[in-house]
């Protein structure tokens, strides 16, 4: 096993630990013109992984959104479905707080 392979597996282990310990808040805000918006905060991921998760969620939920300042912002009220997707992605149910 090369040192590069060891480094990647170490990063994978660290990412998995972060996932288990993260306190993810899923909340809804009313934005401009009274439109509901789902906001995910508290995800301890690097920017690239956050972008990938945001893109995957937008695709699965068939909605628009963005990733900005460590937040995933989705158009519409998708709190329950987002919580289910996070559980499928390996986040502990106890670490997901739906507000």
Image (tube, rainbow, N blue to C red):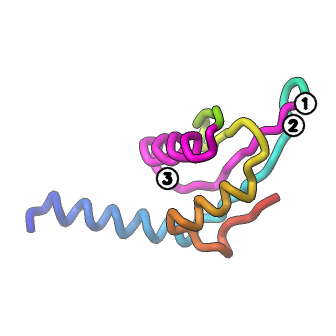
Q: Nearer the viewer, residue 32 or 3?
A: 32
The residue wearing badge 3 is 45
SS label for mark 1: helix
SS label for mark 3: loop
Gap between marks 3 and 1 measured at Cα: 30 Å
Residue 42 picture quarter: bottom right
Task: Report the mark closest to the observer, 3 or 1.
Answer: 1
Per the rendering, the mark at residue 34 is 1
Q: Nearer the viewer, residue 66 or 11?
A: 66
From the top left corner, tell me how far across and down residue 12 is, in percent.
34, 64
Determine contact: label 2, label 3, CB under 8 Å.
no
Per the rendering, the mark at residue 82 is none
- Residue occupying image coordinates x 73% and y 49%: 78
Q: Residues within 10 Å of mark 1 (few under 14, many from 20)?
A: few
Placement of the N terminus among the 4 image quadrants: bottom left
Q: Is residue 20 left or right of residue 23?
A: left
Q: Residues within 10 Å of mark 2 (few under 14, many from 20)?
A: few
Chain part drawn in magenta: 35-62
Residue 37 picture quarter: top right
42 to 47, vertically: above or below: below
- Residue occupying image coordinates x 74% and y 59%: 80
């Amino acid at each position: 096993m090369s040192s590069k392979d060891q480094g990647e597996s170490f990063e994978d282990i660290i990412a998995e630990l972060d996932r288990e310990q993260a306190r993810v808040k899923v909340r809804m805000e009313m934005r401009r013109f009274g439109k509901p918006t789902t906001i995910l905060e508290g995800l301890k991921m690097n920017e690239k992984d956050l972008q990938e998760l945001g893109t995957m969620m937008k695709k699965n939920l068939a909605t628009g959104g963005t990733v900005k300042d460590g937040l995933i912002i989705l158009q519409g009220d998708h709190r329950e479905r987002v919580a289910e997707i996070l559980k499928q992605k390996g986040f502990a149910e106890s670490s997901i707080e739906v507000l």
